[in-house]
Amino acid sequence: MSDRLPGFSTLAVHAGAQPDPTTGARATPIYQTTSFVFNDADHAASLFGLQAFGNIYTRIGNPTNAVLEERVAALEGGTAALAVASGHAAQVVVLQQLLQPGDEFIAARKLYGGSINQFTHAFKSFGWNVVWADPDDIASFERAVTPRTKAIFIESIANPAGSITDIEAISTVARKAGVPLIVDNTLASPYLIRPIDHGADIVVHSLTKFLGGHGNSIGGIIVDAGTFDWSTGGKYPMLSEPRPEYHGIRLQETFGNFAFAIACRVLGLRDLGPALSPFNAFMILTGIETLPLRMQKHCDNAKAVAEFLAGHPAVAAVNYAGLASDKYNQLARKYAPKGAGAVFTFSLKGGYDAGVSLVSKLQLFSHLANVGDTRSLVIHPASTTHSQLDDAAKVKSGAGPDVVRLSIGIEDKEDLIADLEQALGA
Amino acid sequence: MNHDAYPDNYIRAILNSVKSIAMVGASPVNVRPSYFAFKYLAQRGYDMIPVNPGHVGKELLGKPFVASLSDIDRPVDMVDIFRNSSHIMPVVEEALTLDPLPMVIWMQLGARDDAAALKAESVGIKVVMNRCPKIEYGRLSSEISWMGVNSRTLSSKRPPAPTQGMRLSLNRMSVGGGDTAASDRAAKNKTEQS
């Protein structure tokens, strides 16, 4: 038994999973049960008091979900993870541990439109105040820091235009401010970028996208890097102070470098309730086994499609960090050398009308509001995912009226290019 | 020994070889980390001895408290210290007077005293700092995986169905310390700053 680090593909298949002790089943079973029998009263009390490892109730934890959690933690290089019902649920649960009413967090302006919405409107009613900063201007993050700042939130590869964020530069700002850096790694997946290696303290995902990868199951996950010291200055009382709901336990003191993941589970998931179905966990786990194969194909196809579009006379501009001419190409080479992802935007010389016409003529690309599917997808963000933003905010987030977003699948690239060619040409 | 990142084999060998563990600073209060760890290690078959001068005459889960290490009537394989870093040295000095010497001195999560570690290591005692034996046992056996924790181990073998009080195999293939390197680095930076 030597200590060696298995490769990413080995972890994608094996981490967290072992043959079932009872049946010998090799695939991870779907433990489709609400509850788990206690051995006796003492065992029950130990589990409820967080003194023993084990299962109580699927809202708090489930063996199928636990395999998914350990697998993603291993792929991201974190100490622990918590699976939840969706990427949005992951964001609520994370910030609930960090912010009290009246507190602030800084978020990159370039985000998934649903996140911009959640931060701007839904969180306002919790008294969590978002302050926007520009990921292309690191100093704007520094300027946004106040004594009430509790976290910084960015996307590694940002929706919708696939721009690459300088994670290390922003992590320096976070460290100086004494707050954790949260990175949404959905569009990169740990195959392309491992944000913890670049200074992230917390990683979140919509599992719905590339990790699950098949467009069949909604899910989210939170990964604890185990890097942040929650004990200083009473700034994060959910982690550092005695918790009344657990008879005075201090989570950081008790759980050390995975205390944040435990807080998300026992204070967030337990009390807010966005549990992931074990069936979805199983579907997503199956997807993750082929993540390295799929992700490489997604990226290779995306680059070929982006190059085709860049050379097409009807196309005004292509925003894909994998293109040598792109503004984000240097950052892509540094952070995502295997590929710049498979979600990007382009604009047509014919503007909004040409975009609508293109979408209607495509035969293989599906017009829908998702990304990171095996199938290639197309959408007009200004009228859909980013429709709740005002016009100025749409442009700032890279979703202006002339912009079309693609999520490139794992079909044969020649067929994707042929489909775009016929839709653009006629 | 590099106390910033322990190879799994080092921890595994310790947990596989020690039988009796004296826990200095064991608390009878059932929300304290020392209570959790004491109870868990007792359930996994270790001969646990609670050491705390404030509770002599009482028992912890059926084991009588003793006031100090020198009051223990049998050889102690491992001294597990649940005290702040500033209170480590006197405990280590007392441990070094035991005959036979303990094989291991273990300092709990958050506790680290490099001078005390050096002293113990100079007489051949293995030292672990800023770790929890319950967490490490749970991790190497993968029992801790129930909580979504990265055990950093893999296995394609069918484990026995766990029953209460059973000792678990710690001999899974290790992913090494490398994959949570970020956390180890952060701990090291904190040590250097303090």
Image (cartoon, helix red, strand yellow):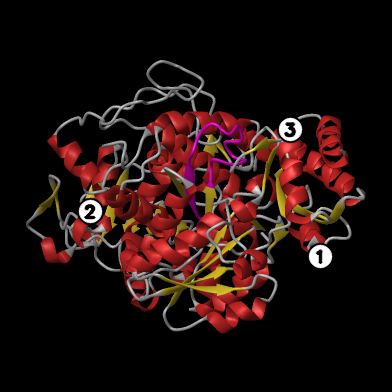
- Residue A6 location (% of width, % of height): 65, 39
Task: Give the x, y percent position of residue B27.
Answer: 19, 59
The magenta region covers: A206-225
Question: What residue is rendered at 81% in x and 29% in y?
Answer: A412
The answer to whether the residues at label 2 and label 1 have Cβ atoms under 8 Å apart is no
Q: Is residue B132 left or right of residue A290?
A: left
Amino acid type at mark 3:
Ile
Q: Check residue A225 in the rendering and tell me which mark sits there, or answer none.
A: none
Q: Mark 3 = which residue?
A: A410
Q: Is residue A291 shown above or below B77?
A: above
Amino acid marked by disc 2 = Tyr
Could one spot residue B110 in this view of the protein? no
| Quarter-of-image position of residue B19 | top left
Which residue is drawn at the image coordinates 49% and 76% (left, top)? A178
What's the distance in space between the residues labelled 1 and 3, CA to CA? 26 Å
Q: CA distance from mark 2 to mark 3?
A: 53 Å
**Marked residue chain, label 1:** A
Type of amino acid under label 1: Lys
Q: Quadrant of the N terminus of chain A?
A: top right
Q: Nearer the viewer, mark 2 or mark 1?
A: 1
State the residue in front, A380 or A302: A380
Residue under pointer 1: A327
Q: Which residue is mark 2?
A: B35
